[in-house]
């Protein structure tokens, strides 16, 4: 998400969870457990859905840790949260058809 290599990503992860390791680990275990309990009776067909939710959960946890560790209201860092914007296509009129 930040365009770092694998080793830099591990260093960055270590920086983000510093002083919050147990809370982060507990949140991950609790989320994983709740997802598995919720979807286990349904069967293995929904395993892809569970994995997708797990990835979403991890992404939300990343942004939460980043916002707590860094100043979320700093205008310079707030710009890095936004994805690039593509230009909006012009409206079509009946004459264009």
Image: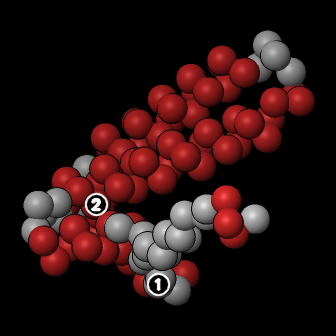
Q: Earlier in the sequence, mark 1 or mark 2?
A: 1
Q: Would you say 97 lies left or right of 14 here?
A: right
The quadrant where residue 42 appears: top right
Residue 62 image point, x, y percent = 39, 56
Q: Is residue 7 visible?
A: no
Q: CA distance from mark 1 to mark 2?
A: 15 Å
Q: Are marks 1 and 2 in contact (CB under 8 Å)?
A: no
Query: Which residue does the numbered mark 2 point to in the structure image?
Result: 66
Residue 26 image point, x, y percent = 40, 36
Q: Would you say 53 lies left or right of 58 here?
A: right
Residue 72 image point, x, y percent = 16, 60
The quadrant where residue 74 appears: bottom left
Q: Would you say 47 lies left or right of 77 here?
A: right
SS label for mark 1:
loop
Q: Is residue 47 visible?
A: yes
Query: Which residue does the numbered mark 1 point to in the structure image?
Result: 4
Q: Would you say 29 lies left or right of 70 here?
A: right
Q: Quadrant of the C terminus?
A: bottom right
Please tell me how crowded label 1 is: few (under 14), some (14-19), or many (20+) other residues with Cα within 10 Å. Answer: few
Residue 36 image point, x, y percent = 67, 26
Seen from the viewer's position, the closer of residues 95 and 50 is 95
User: Residue at horizontal 66%, vertical 17%?
Assistant: 38
User: Residue at horizontal 60%, vertical 42%?
Assistant: 54
């Amino acid at each position: 998400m930040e365009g770092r290599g694998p080793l830099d990503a591990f260093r960055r992860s270590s920086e983000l969870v510093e002083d919050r390791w147990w809370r982060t680990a507990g949140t991950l275990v609790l989320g994983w457990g709740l997802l598995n309990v919720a979807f286990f009776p349904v069967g293995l067909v929904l395993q892809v859905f569970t994995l997708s939710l797990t990835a979403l959960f991890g992404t939300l946890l990343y942004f939460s840790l980043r916002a707590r560790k860094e100043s979320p209201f700093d205008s310079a860092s707030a710009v890095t949260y936004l994805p690039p914007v593509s230009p909006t296509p012009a409206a079509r009129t009946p004459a264009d058809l």
